[in-house]
Amino acid sequence: MTEQSAVLNLPNNQTFQIPIIEPVAGKPCLDIRKLGSQTQHFTYDSGFLSTASCRSTITFIDGEQGELWYRGYPIEQLAEKCNFLEVAYLLKNGELPNAQQKSEFENIVVHHSLIHEQLIKFYQGFRRDAHPMAVMTGVVGALSAFYHDVMDFRTQQDRDTSYVRLLGKMPTIIALAYKYSIGMPFMYPDNELSYSGNFLRMMFSNPCEEFKLNPVIERALDIIFILHADHEQNASTSTVRLAGSSGANPFACIAAGIACLWGPAHGGANEACLKMLEEIGDIKNIPHYIKRAKDKDDNFKLMGFGHRVYKNFDPRAKLMKKVCHQVLQELNLQDDPLFKLAMELEKIALEDDYFVSKQLYPNVDFYSGIVQKAIGIPTKMFTCVFALARTAGWLAQWEEMITDPEYKIGRPRQIYVGHQKRDVPDLLQR
């Protein structure tokens, strides 16, 4: 509820009364929606660093305090007490499921894990060495050509069906992309397994032998999914909302979000982190690269450290660090050169005055990349795993947006800095 206002003084003695919106948590917002129509002035905010694009009840981040909530629940408690599908249910419906709701939701998601058999042939149109994110973007976008029977998104039933279809099929889509890239047979889903367990089986099993799930690895992957399920109005989530604001179907919107997530500054950060570790190569080389990271004239960046939003420790990183050490111990990889290098780099960054003063703490990408590498997930698949988890949040954000009575098609403004109006010269005069 708006209780206060601010006054903007403009040229020619023009003033504009700006209502102040007080959120449940976080910083107050100046409501400038009528600024353009009433004053003929717009605001400039490159990167939307100070602009709220929507009202949302889904996720809250306090970057200064290092807090992350899903629907009011701290991420630490959710990672400890819930599985990924419980969190997905929470993101969509606003409350955690009871025992019956949990069972019913898990059952319906599992039974939507198969994809259309014709869609499997779609994979054969890609080169074997295609990046799996390219394959994933294409296949998810193509889902609308196969599942166009529930496209009336004004109805709750159609929205619910689209949600479970996308959430259920995403592990299958990613696992098939991986199997295709290495020339291995496709493995169909097993409805008796958990969401995370089924993904691991489709990724790493083959028809020739029995696949045995490691419960430590299964739980580690589930926590990765939980920690990446949503993160407020980041670039890919804003992309999903912007695409959805035009009335586009959710398959197209999620494909757009996947394409945005692919960027190395966003979902590709954990992949970039592993490549950095491979570049450093050996513990003895760390001082050299630390020196380069501190040199403002050097283009080298220490990937996996610091965060645009969190000015304190990333709360997801604290949880992921614990999981990371559990996985390395379970798989007896503490002495692996790459992982020893990562742990030494973590130790130095946490103790070095330069990184501590600038609050460049290890972020979730640093640890999740190490965990996925240890599990056996190829580096190029890291962002796909991120996209799988974030689908739960993207779909919740999409539904919140299209059911919001205030929503309008996105239309950012610009500051034009090109040529003045000019005449087109004749061809011989150009």
Image (tube, helix red, strand yellow):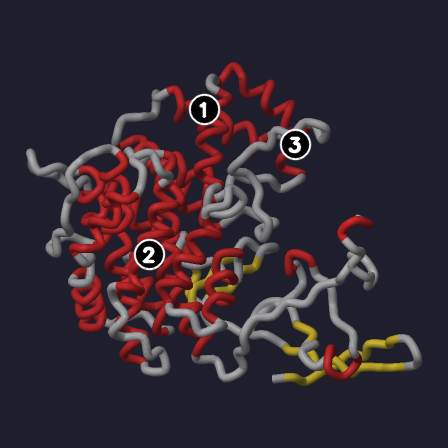
Out of 4 and 404, give the one closest to the viewer: 404
Q: Tell me the distance, in whole angstroms, between the alpha carbons under discs 1 and 2.
A: 31 Å
Front-most of residues 103 and 17: 17
Q: Nearer the viewer, residue 133 or 79?
A: 133
- In this view of the protein, can residue 82 be seen by the observer? no
Task: Tell me residue 133's x, y (percent).
Answer: 38, 45
- Mark 1 and mark 3 lie on one chain; the one further toward the N terminus is 1
Would residue 151 be found to the left or right of residue 120 on screen? right
Q: Is residue 136 left or right of residue 190?
A: right
Q: CA distance from mark 1 to mark 3?
A: 25 Å
| Circle nearer the viewer, 1 or 3 | 1
Give SS at disc 2. helix
Three-letter amino acid code at disc 2? Val
Where residue 98 sits, quadrant-wise, is: bottom left
| Residue 85 left/right relative to 360 | left
For the residue labelled by badge 1, is the local secondary structure a helix, a strand or a loop? helix
Identify the residue position indicated by label 2 in the image.
140
Q: Percent from the top left, x then y, of residue 287?
A: 59, 19
**Which is closer to the viewer, label 2 or label 3?**
2
Q: Residue at x 60, y 32 (%)?
A: 301
The residue that mark 1 highlights is 278
Instruction: Give the number of the disc on residue 353.
Output: 3
Above or below, 411 against 260 in this view is below
